[in-house]
Amino acid sequence: MKYVIAIIKPFKLDDVREALTTLGIQGLTVSEVKGFGRQKGQTEIYRGAEYTVSFLPKLKIELAVAADLVERVVETIQKTANTGRIGDGKIFVLDVAQAVRIRTGETGDSAL
């Protein structure tokens, strides 16, 4: 099992969710996060005053998948979330030692 974490632009969420659903992904977790990378934030003008926004709004998508699905999941997120502009985000893949469905006690891939 693998744990996939993707940081994407907020307006890409629906496209990514729909694309993952077509792969058979049945669940994921989404969190609103803020951060910066190479962009280093951005400068905005509010009521005539210029100020720097250090952290940009992003969404963090987290999902656990069977090891045989991970490459297709990563490929799908990358293609769907890509705008070709700086700040499109990152994808991280981690190993999962164990998963347990609380309601039924199922473990491993069947818990996903």
Image: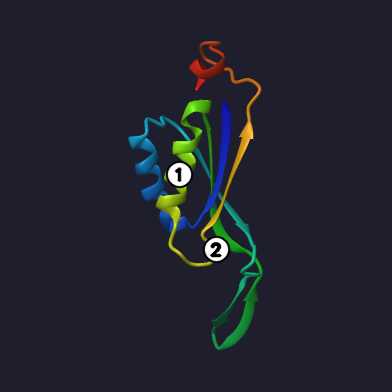
Residue at the image position 62 percent from the left and 70 percent from the top: 41
Single out the residue that lies furthest toward the top: 105
Residue in the foreground of this view, choosing between 55 and 89: 89
Give the residue drawn at x 37%, y 30%.
24
Q: Which residue is mark 2?
A: 87
- The answer to which image quadrant residue 72 occupies is top left
Quadrant of the image containing the N terminus: top right
> Residue flagged by tag 1: what amino acid is it?
Glu
Q: Earlier in the sequence, mark 2 or mark 1?
A: 1
Relative image position of residue 13 (x, y in whole percent): 42, 50
**For mark 1, what is the residue?**
75
Residue 68's place in the image compared with 81, above or below, is above
Residue type pointed to by label 2: Gly
Q: Is residue 105 above or below residue 37?
A: above
Q: Examine the rendering and report whether any part of residue 5 can be seen.
A: yes
Q: SS of the residue at dot 2?
A: loop
Q: Residue 74 or 41: which is nearer the viewer? A: 74
- Front one among 106 and 104: 106
* Location of residue 33 in the rendering, given as x and y in whole percent from the top left corner: 59, 53
Helix, strand or loop status at disc 1: helix
Q: Is residue 101 visible?
A: no
User: Does the CB distance between marks 2 and 1 fall below 8 Å?
Assistant: no
The mark tally for this picture is: 2
- The residue that appears at 44% across and 57% down in the rendered structure is 82
Q: Position of residue 31 (x, y in %)?
A: 55, 46
